[in-house]
Image (cartoon, rainbow, N blue to C red):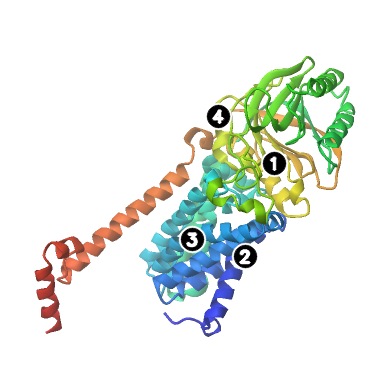
Amino acid sequence: MRTPDWVASPWRRRGAVVVAGALPVLAFPAPGLWWFAYGALVPWMLLVRTAPTGRRAMYDGWLGGCAFMLAMHHWLLPNLHVFTFVIAGLLGALWAPWAWLVRRFLAGTPSPGRVAAALLVVPSGWLAIELVRSWQGLGGPWGLLGSSQWQVEPALRLASVGGVWLLSFLVVAVNVAVTVLVSVRRSRAPALAGLVATATATSAVWLWSPRPDVRGEVRIAVVQPGVTDGPDSRFAREETLTRRLAGQDLDLIVWGESSVGHDLADRPDLADRIAALARETDTNILVNVDARRSDRPGIYKSSVLVGPDGPTGDRYDKMRLVPFGEYIPMRSLLGWATSVGEAAGEDRRQGTTQVVFDSGKGLRIGPMVCFESAFPDMSRRLVRDGAELLLAQSATSTFQQSWAPEQHASLAALRAAETGRPMAHATLTGVSAVYGPDGERVGSRLGTDESTTAVYEVPLAGGTTPYVRFGDWPVHTALLVLVVWGAFEGVRTVRLRWRTGSPPPSAQAANPSSTARTTRSHSS
């Protein structure tokens, strides 16, 4: 295929791929151009399909993947500095095989069969990337393409069926079809048919998917102290704000991540002050302790419920820690990161199991800490264990003036829609927000410039969504599609070699003399 003249220069092509790879970030908060996601991959795929070789396509995939990861996590630069580029470079390699698939199916003038296969295989390849990078050790599932649709009501309905994974698959499939429509006139009919089929299937799922079975409501309050100078000042501000909630007839009060900077067993005076607030408001308070524990070695981040008589004994220790922010993977090898950025000087300790609390007024709550709200499996497990309200205690004050607070808060909408349970995202410095069991926002959000409290009347829901029941079935289906396609390609390659008189590599290795005779025969 002939490469367009304007990208014939290697440097122009590299620049174009970098820009194209970074474009999808505009669909996420803070820009929030959710509709842009349905065409954001098109420029990237148009470039990849014109790659002269498969190797060049893989290079374009790596370069575009680096740009996407760097754009999505650019707010880490002031803290991780050069290490942000290292992480982007390593994770960008995940897109190299995907780009090879794009070229394999869309190069030249693809037949109707190739276009139909591309609508399944290329999105499946993208889901495989998202699955791999969702591993906590690689940074977790931040910036999954489907999460850009967090404020679209039909998309939230689909999330209740197949989670964020189903949304990612559909968004990539639409991008594949649009790429064919704008680049290959002869293949427009199958691409258009694919778009119609996708829209039809999506509409059917949207109509069929069950709505949340709303059963009453609860009143919860979020305390957001805002930017303060140190843990003692923060605690005093939280104390002042919480007193304002007296007489509000609440079911739960939630403080943000690291709202308490000392272990409560080691500082009974702090535990007594929180218990006094619980008595004054007649409501249990969920705090988050970020401190060295007195009963075991190491620093933990823990959700702790405090009632009128002190800590109730309900405690959840954060299980999935932020790489470099809360621990350094392979510290003996990568410990130098502390010298070039604000990486963790000491590793936090991991919890071992998720916990569902009783709020004290009959409400069962499922706490998560910080970026654990990005993991769909964690909220799904909490709901399966009986949680009626999901909670994420977060602190993004380090990234206060970036896109991070907006991106983080939006994840709660997806977790709520996936599970059919409301979710509160409570932070120290914003953005704090609450979402109902359908993923729609409840009440007003608290921005990064606010130091206040907010009371929310949160609808509760029963029933079980298909996603909670069946789990990550879109991912499993995508992996099956890749395996089936790989097997088909393998069989087709073997048959082609036998038809042309060239035995498969195993036969050539077993009988090298016959290979030589075949080569001489063809040359004569």
N-terminal-most mark, 2 or 1 = 2
**For the residue marked with disc 4, what is the amino acid?**
Thr
Q: Tell me if residue 124 can be seen.
A: yes
Residue named by callout 1:
440
N-terminal-most mark, 3 or 1 = 3
Kindly indicate whether the residue at mark 2 contacts the one at mark 3 (C-beta within 8 angstroms): no
- Mark sitting on residue 23: 2
**For the residue marked with disc 2, what is the amino acid?**
Leu
For numbered disc 2, what is the local secondary structure? helix
Comparing 475 with 321, the one in front is 321
N-terminal-most mark, 3 or 2 = 2
For numbered disc 4, what is the local secondary structure? loop
Which is closer to the viewer, label 2 or label 4? 4
**For the residue marked with disc 3, what is the amino acid?**
Ala
Comparing 521 with 291, the one in front is 291
Residue 2: x %, y % from top left: 44, 82
Residue 495: x %, y % from top left: 20, 63
Please tell me whether residue 37 is drawn above or below residue 512 in the rendered image. Answer: above
Whole-angstrom CA distance, mark 2 to mark 1, is 27 Å
N-terminal-most mark, 1 or 4 = 4
